[in-house]
Amino acid sequence: MEIELSSGTPADLYPVVGAKRGLVIAPDLMGRRKLFDDMASGLASSQAWNVVVVDPFRGRTFSTATTDERHQVVPSLDDDEIVGDLVDAANRLEVEPVAIVGFCMGGMYAFKASASHRFDRIVSFYGMIRIPEKWRGPGQREPLRLIEHAADPGAILAIIGTLDPYTPADDVDELEARGVEVVRYEGAEHAFVHDPTRASHRSADAADAWSRFHRHLVT
């Protein structure tokens, strides 16, 4: 069901009776859509988790279904607002503990949310470790800097493809040096896990990555 966060940001909530934990999903650049509805409802029913998907653009509307307009908007986003929405969504789940998982841009915000100390486990699927040049703006802070303020960097799992231009090898090494658990998939490009319709999808690697995601949240 759709809910409205305190900021007015829409989110999709999937509660279950007797939930064992909560999970906040930070979507990719394309935001909330059926892909994440199916993901959230599947995790809620199969894992007995309360799950919520948070809109990254505070209800902005876009005239096309391409990424172009969204890329243009990202520099105007504010970390405090985005992470504030993610924390507010966690509080709406009415269960503890609460984890967060993010994909692509959402993975970047999952890294940033580590500084909030609200989430017991954090999983970033190919999230940007440093802000891409075209996304830089006054409200954007570097993910690596915020990870320095994480309560436990070891509670962060980063799923990385070695051919992903958004996660250069030097950045990945620095992320790992911060104490983050990094899993590298050789030859994988950006977004190789969460959307089977993408050309970059790799089914075997995706299955392994999802398995690691589940283990990270239950240990």
Image (spheres, rainbow, N blue to C red):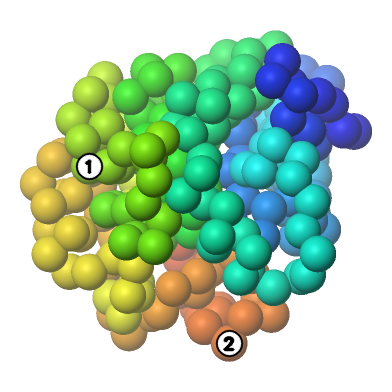
Quadrant where the N terminus sits is top right
Quadrant in the rendering for residue 23: top right
Q: Looking at the image, is mark 2 or mark 1 earlier in the sequence?
A: 1
Of tags 2 and 1, the one toward the viewer is 1
> Judging from the image, what secondary structure is the residue with disc 1 in?
helix
The residue depicted at 64 percent of the width and 64 percent of the height is: 69
Q: Is residue 42 visible?
A: no
Query: In the depicted view, which residue is nearer to us: 75 or 66?
Result: 75
Residue neighbourhood size for the residue with mark 1, other residues' Cα within 10 Å, grouped as few (<14), some (14–19), many (≥20)? some
Where is residue 56 drawn, in percent x and y?
Answer: 63, 43
Where is residue 37 drawn, in percent x and y?
Answer: 79, 50
Q: Which mark is residue 144?
A: 1
Q: Is residue 176 left or right of residue 90?
A: left
Q: Is residue 130 visible?
A: yes
The residue depicted at 16 percent of the width and 39 percent of the height is: 179
Instruction: Identify the residue under disc 2.
Output: 199
Q: Is residue 197 above or below residue 62?
A: below
The residue depicted at 9 percent of the width and 46 percent of the height is: 177
Estimate the spatial distance between the alpha carbons at disc 2 and disc 1, rounded to whole Å: 29 Å
The residue depicted at 66 percent of the width and 43 percent of the height is: 57
Query: In the depicted view, which residue is nearer to us: 110 or 69?
Result: 69
Q: Is residue 114 above or below residue 101?
A: above
**Which amino acid type corresponds to the residue marked 1 in the rendered image?**
Leu
Q: Is residue 188 above or below residue 134?
A: below
Quadrant in the rendering for residue 13: top right
Q: Is residue 53 left or right of residue 106?
A: right
**Which amino acid type corresponds to the residue marked 2 in the rendered image?**
Ala
Where is residue 175 drawn, in percent x and y?
Answer: 19, 49
